[in-house]
């Protein structure tokens, strides 16, 4: 029996599952790149549009807040449609919003374009997670999430450096046009290669969209998952918007060196993500999360207190920080995906993504109020305060993920007790239901 349970740790992926991973990874790449490129363009935007840190913080928050509102409005309908159709609808809207960002010529038009992009783009991640949860068992999700979130690393290796090069050559609007073009090609892949995903429709009850939303909110276990995700988002968003401005004005990294810094961090992400994903499927997810969080807390304190630093040292510290960030992001996503029942997954993922975006928007706006820059070229002040706040929030996240881990393990144990699996196949069925 022990040998049979050991075998379930590595469940092979079918050829179609690999295709789904590829499509979702490319879609995730474009959405992440659209959002991530705001940070490296931050210094350029603040100088070009004469923005204060607080204004730039709101430009970042606009996407997050609109994405959060969109997710809440969508949650009641998320389980009532073919997930492929839902993904394609919002992805096309995201492409339009990104195109409008490229057409912006003032702070107000940029703000409006970011709101439109967030209304559509902010829901795509939750739809993708619902698709992953429907098509992959819990014992596969660490690998799957690790590969799909390689879009995060790929955006830094290819997208952000190329985006910065394009911005330096043709203006800060050009990277958004580049993202819109790549996304349009990806939409064709979704349209013609992704199969309908409708298994969840048979499990729907005759509830209105509002009742389905309230039903999802009413479950205590779901609310614990929502709280854990929101806290993780707060910790991640506080430092991110002003990362490029801090590197240029405090660490004295030049605009020409900035793409190299992002490329090195991205390459590290591409190397680390599959490793963390496999570890997440082989060892206890909560222990991996805790180690990654503690590691990140130490590096964050060191990094946010740096002054002028050689490029090689900044790159090394960024790689170490990336290890901690990814070490917590992948196992936490895999654990959270196991909380909802199949009939609630779309709504749960939409609400979860909404609260994540809203919490991130609050964190970005908070960061804009804390950070001060007296002139366009002077160092950012109080950036280390954001680092300490990130450490404090991350400590609370460990407790929240501990509760989520206990819930998930109890859920799996209850299912095993009901079905009493005697084979690898029956145990796989249990895991797919989680």
Image (spheres, rainbow, N blue to C red):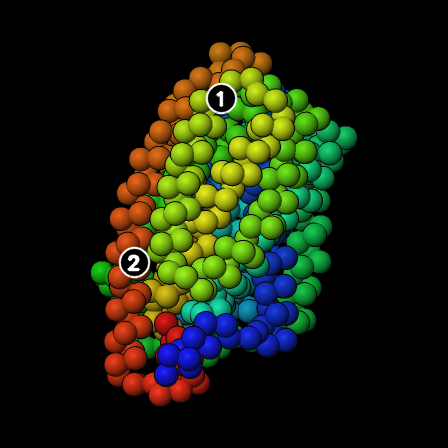
* Whether residue 320 is situated above or below residue 424 in the rendered picture: above
* Whether residue 35 is situated above or below residue 248 in the rendered picture: below
Task: Determine the CA span between mark 2 and mark 1.
Answer: 35 Å
* Number of the label disc, if any, that sits on residue 47: none
Q: For residue 9, which quarter of the picture?
A: bottom left
**Is residue 46 visible from the viewing direction of this image?**
no
Q: Position of residue 209 (x, y in %)?
A: 35, 66
- Residue located at (30% from left, 80% from top): 416
- Residue located at (57% from left, 28% from top): 314
* Whether residue 276 is situated above or below residue 51 in the rendered picture: below
Q: Position of residue 382 (x, y in %)?
A: 41, 20
- Residue located at (27% from left, 74% from top): 413
Q: Position of residue 20 (x, y in %)?
A: 60, 68
- Residue underneath mark 2: 404
Specify the quadrant that holds the C terminus. Answer: bottom left
- Residue underneath mark 1: 306
User: Which element type, helix, strand or loop, lies under badge 1?
Assistant: loop
User: In terms of sequence position, does the residue under pointer 2 or pointer 1 come before the other?
Assistant: 1
Disc 2 residue crowd, few under 14, some 14–19, many 20+, Cα 10 Å: many
Q: Nearer the viewer, residue 386 or 113?
A: 386
In-image side of 375 versus 159 (left or right): left
């Amino acid at each position: 029996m022990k040998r049979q349970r050991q075998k379930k740790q590595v469940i092979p992926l079918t050829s179609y599952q690999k295709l789904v991973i590829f499509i979702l990874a490319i879609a995730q790449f474009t959405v992440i790149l659209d959002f991530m490129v705001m940070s490296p363009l931050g210094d350029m935007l603040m100088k070009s549009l004469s923005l204060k840190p607080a204004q730039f913080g709101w430009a970042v928050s606009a996407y997050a807040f609109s994405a959060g509102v969109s997710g809440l409005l969508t949650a009641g309908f998320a389980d009532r449609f073919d997930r492929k159709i839902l993904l394609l609808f919002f992805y096309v809207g995201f492409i339009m919003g990104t195109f409008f960002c490229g057409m912006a010529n003032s702070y107000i038009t940029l703000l409006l374009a970011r709101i439109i992009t967030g209304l559509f783009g902010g829901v795509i991640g939750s739809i993708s997670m619902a698709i992953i949860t429907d098509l992959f068992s819990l014992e596969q999700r660490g690998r799957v999430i690790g590969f799909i979130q390689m879009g995060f690393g790929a955006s830094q290796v290819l997208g952000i450096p190329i985006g910065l090069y394009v911005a330096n050559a043709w203006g800060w609007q050009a990277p958004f046009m580049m993202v819109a073009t790549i996304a349009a090609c990806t939409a064709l892949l979704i349209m013609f290669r992704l199969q309908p995903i409708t298994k969840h429709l048979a499990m729907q009850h005759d509830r209105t969209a509002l009742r389905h939303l309230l039903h999802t909110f009413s479950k205590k276990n779901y609310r614990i998952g929502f709280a854990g995700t929101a806290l993780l988002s707060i910790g991640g968003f506080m430092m991110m918007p002003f990362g490029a401005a801090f590197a240029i004005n405090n660490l004295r990294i030049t605009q020409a060196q900035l793409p190299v810094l992002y490329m090195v961090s991205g390459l590290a992400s591409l190397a680390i993500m599959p490793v963390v994903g496999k570890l997440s499927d082989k060892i206890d997810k909560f222990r991996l999360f805790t180690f990654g969080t503690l590691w990140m807390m130490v590096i964050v304190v060191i990094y946010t207190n740096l002054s002028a630093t050689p490029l090689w040292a900044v790159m090394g510290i960024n790689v170490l920080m990336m290890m901690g960030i990814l070490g917590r992001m992948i196992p936490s996503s895999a654990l959270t995906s196991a909380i909802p029942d199949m009939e609630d997954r779309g709504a749960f993922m939409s609400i979860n993504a909404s609260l994540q975006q809203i919490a991130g928007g609050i964190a970005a706006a908070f960061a804009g109020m804390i950070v001060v820059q007296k002139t366009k070229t002077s160092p950012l002040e109080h950036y280390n305060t954001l680092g300490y706040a990130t450490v404090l929030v991350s400590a609370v996240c460990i407790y929240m993920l501990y509760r989520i881990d206990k819930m998930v393990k109890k859920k799996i144990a209850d299912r095993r007790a009901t079905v009493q699996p005697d084979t690898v196949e029956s145990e796989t069925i249990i895991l797919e239901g989680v």
